[in-house]
Structures are given as C-alpha cells and as structure tokens.
Amino acid sequence: MCLAIPGKIVEIRGVVAIVDYGGVRREARIDFVPDVKQGDYVIVHTGFAIEKMDEESAKKSIEAWDEILEGDLE
C-alpha cells in the first residue's frame, strides 16, 4: 500500500517538474500526466507523477497529513 502526499508543481523543465512538498522540493517526471502545468498538484510514485489532483482535494489531503504528523487525531 502506498500513502501519497500531494505536491505542488513549482517549475517545469521539459518532461521533468520540480514538485514542492511543504518546502521540500524534488524532481518528478511528468510523462504520464502531460496536461499538468505550474501550480497544479500531483501525486508522485517512484519519481513519476501519476495523477493530477484538484487544489481543494490536495489541500484537504495535506491538512489530514499535517494532523496525523502532529498527533492531533480525535
């Protein structure tokens, strides 16, 4: 099972995007999601963006991860 955290594309260089995960930036190939653009949220698996997420869903997912990491589950 894979637990994915959405990342925001901050830069695109050909088929490689720079994806920001709350201040940590990583490269990801975007071959499988060719319609993405700067500002989009994506799910990355093994260095490849595999899914584009709408902003609302991405932010909800990020908030849920923040709660888990802070141990603030009720």
Image (cartoon, rainbow, N blue to C red):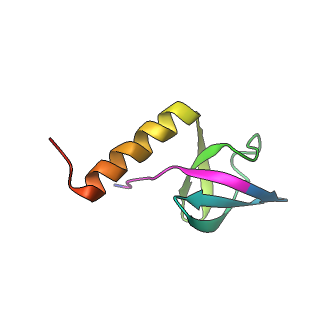
On screen, residue 57 above or below 22: above
Left or right: 3, with 13 as reference point = left
- Mark count: 0
Q: Would you say 16 lies left or right of 8 here?
A: right
User: Residue 24's x, y, as percent?
Assistant: 55, 67
Q: Which residues are magenta?
A: 2-10
Task: Identify the residue at the far left of this view.
Answer: 74
Residue at position x 21%, y 49% in the image: 72
Q: Residue furthest right?
A: 14
Q: Quadrant of the C terminus?
A: top left
Query: Of residues 50 and 22, which is closer to you in this image?
Result: 22
Picture coordinates of residue 66 (x, y %)? 35, 52
- Tell me which residue sits at (43%, 46%) in the image: 62
Q: Give whichever of 53, 66 is nearer the camera.
A: 66
Question: Would residue 15 be visible to someone looking at this image?
Answer: no
Q: Residue at x 61, y 67 (%)?
A: 25
Q: Quadrant of residue 61?
A: top left
The front one of 41 and 3 is 41
Find out whether residue 55 is within the magenta segment: no
Work out which quarter of the rendered image holds the N terminus and state it: bottom left
- Above or below — where is 41 with respect to 27? above
Q: Residue 50 in the image: x percent, y percent?
A: 59, 49
Q: Position of residue 12 (x, y in %)?
A: 79, 57
User: Does the image show residue 48?
Assistant: yes
